[in-house]
Structure formats: structure tokens, C-alpha cells
Image (cartoon, rainbow, N blue to C red):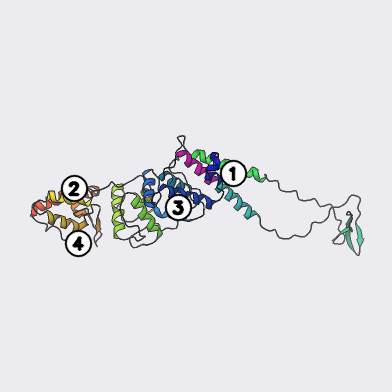
Amino acid sequence: MDDAARDPLTHVATAGEYVALLRDVRRRSGLTYREITRLASAAGHWLPPSTLATMLGRTTLPRERTVVALLVACGTTPADVRRWVETRRNIEARLGERDRWENQAVPTTSSPPAAPQQVANSEPVVDGGAAVNVAPAANSEPAVDVAPAGTVVGPVRPTPPRVTAPWPTRRWHRLAVLAMLGVLTVGASGVLLPGAAATVDSSPSDGCPLILRQGMYGPCVLDLQERLVAGGLDVPVDGWFGPDTTSRLIVFQAFGGLPVSGTADGRVLDELSGAVKVPPTWTEDRIGKEVRRVFPEDPGGAVQLARCLSGLDPYRVEIAGDGSRRWGLFQFSDEELSRLGVDRRTALDPGWSIGAARHVWSRTGDFGHWHCTASR
């Protein structure tokens, strides 16, 4: 059996069959949607779990960049990725030709029959005050065309047919253009260049508000949360723009050097899809050990305070009613950071936050500087 017979990709003819093969690739990889998202992100692609689930749950042709992201995450070789992309483009070309021919195949309205041509040596005959042009026809009665009295009917030239390129020629022209685009998209090393434009479907942010803010709910917020997760921030992916999403968004803005607004506009979404990643932070176990080491006088009380203030989350940002913010493990305010000459990224460093808390404690001998009554 030759390679073409063993390779099902060579026999794919429809978008549904193409998606079915993609589902098979995902199944054989043994990876979960979350694992595929993480591997795709590590390779420089953006493929949220919801986008992956939507793509594999439909029978329509998926976007090229999502196909590439899935294949790369599943360990497909660059050569096979190119074959998948070529097959997808061929299917897209066929769909485009079919749609164009269906749009052109519109029934034309009936029009009056064209006047017969004047036959050589025929003479106009006057009958009842009207000029009649008689043209003989084989095995039929003479055709009679009636015109107003006093009008001499001359020859009528037929409309020349519209000259168009035959269908195979137009089809190959289209495929040649697509092939040229493929050459521009695929680098000499055989790896798809980043930033290749999608050829079908629209961006996930199409139809979303220009600015996403706390209190909103829906797929646009879900997309934002998935981008935050892909950027290294743990946040519930539930479609609800609540305090947790606001906190994580502020952290991303602080690390990315963006205006710390807690809202997401087009620039923030672009940055979330880019190379900016939030560095991994300490685990709860490491935080607990360090807090106990730094506060040997009252290790349990120090850990309890940090848990109450931030839930032992170094990336916790709380927003007060007046709009001011508190940062990190021990929730230092904007005013305190300014007084200490510390930027927001430093405030999110758990080592700095624990050391700064120890400095405050050394002046007072207790934890009276903080007020926290609710445990997290």
C-alpha cells in the first residue's frame, strides 16, 4: 500500500472531513484541552480551550492559525503541518468556487424575442397599413414581425457572447494565488511564521465592547480570562468579570508596563496575545515557610494575617472604595509604595512584601498596622 492510500489527509474533500481528522489528531495525542492550550502557548501560538472546543465541535472550515496551533501542540512535524495547511487551502478554494457559481446561477427574467434578421433580397410588404418583414425558415411558416406603419425593418445584429476564461483556467489561477500566499507564509525553515493572517472566520474580539470592565458577563469576558490564563495568571474562566478578573488584569498591566486601569481595551488584548508573560510566583508552602522564618516571634500570627489579607496570594490586588489599591501578600497601599519609592512590580514580589512587613512589625512590635477580620 502506498503512502497516499495510508494517509487519510490525501482523501479529504470537505470541511467536515477535515475537522473530523483534526479531532482524531487531538484524540490520538492523549492531551486535554488545557494541556493543548499550554503547549500551544509555549510554542508562541494562542489557542484557548473554548476556541479549540468550538473548532472541533463544528463542521465548518476552521481558521488556519488555530489549525496550526493545534497541530504544533500535538507534536506534528513542520512538514506535516504544511500538508495540513495546503489541504485546508485547497478545500477553501473549492468552497469559494462553489459559492461563486451558486451566486452566479440566478434565473434570468424573460425578455421579448429578438426580431428576426432581414434576409437578403427580401422586400418589405405592406399589409393593412403596417410594414411586415418576412423571413423564410426551413420547414416552417414564414416568421412575421410587425412594425409601425411607414417603418422599414433592417437587419438586427445578434449580441456577441461574453468571452470568459474556462472554469479550469480560473480555478488554477485562484490556486496559484493561494500557493503564492503559502510561500510568503511559510518560511524557508519549514516553520509557519508568526502573525500569519487568518483567511476565514473573524477575530474572537469581533462584536465585543471597546472596553471590558468589572460587572460584565459573556463570551468576550471569557476570551479575556482565557488570555489571562495563557499569560500566566490563574483566574476563574467563567465569563464573569468580577474582582478576581480585575485583580489579575491589574497584575498583567503592572508587569507589562501598561496603564493600570483594571479594564481591557484593544491594546490590552493585543498585549495579552503577545509575548508578555507574568513570571511564576511562590507556592503557598514556600510562602508559609518564609513568613515563619522571618517572624520567629509569632510565626502563626504572621501566616494568619497574610492569609486574611491576601489568601497567601502574592498577586492579590484589592481596590478600595475610593479607587486606591493594595498590593501583594501584605497588601501595601499605593500611598505606602510611593513613600517607600517602590513600583508595583516590586510590590507583587512575595520576598519584598514579607521583608517590608517585617520592617513595619519591627517598629511597632505587633501587627496593629493592619486591620483584617475576614479570613479568605
Residue drawn at the location 33% of the way across and 49% of the way down: 231
- Is 24 magenta? The answer is no
Query: Where does the image place residue 333, in percent across and percent down from the top left?
Result: 20, 55
Badge 2 marks a residue whose secondary structure is: helix
Crowding around mark 4 (Cα neighbors within 10 Å: few <14, some 14 to 19, many 20+) is few
Q: Earlier in the sequence, mark 4 or mark 2?
A: 2
Alpha carbon separation for disc pair 3 and 4: 41 Å
Q: Are marks 1 and 2 in contact (CB under 8 Å)?
A: no
Asked if 185 appears above or below 62 in the picture, the reply is above
Considering the numbered disc 3 on the image, is that residue within a helix, a strand or a loop? Answer: loop
From which residue to which does the magenta span run?
77-89
Residue 157 in percent (x, y) is at 80, 50
Q: Is residue 294 visible?
A: yes
- Write down the residue under mark 2: 352
Residue found 53% across the figure and 42% down from its top:
6
Quadrant (top left, top right, bottom left, bottom right) of the N terminus: top right
Q: Amino acid at mark 3?
A: Ser
Marks 4 and 2: CB-CB under 8 Å?
Answer: no
Tell me, for residue 174, which label it has, or none. 1
> Is residue 205 visible in the rendered structure shown here?
no
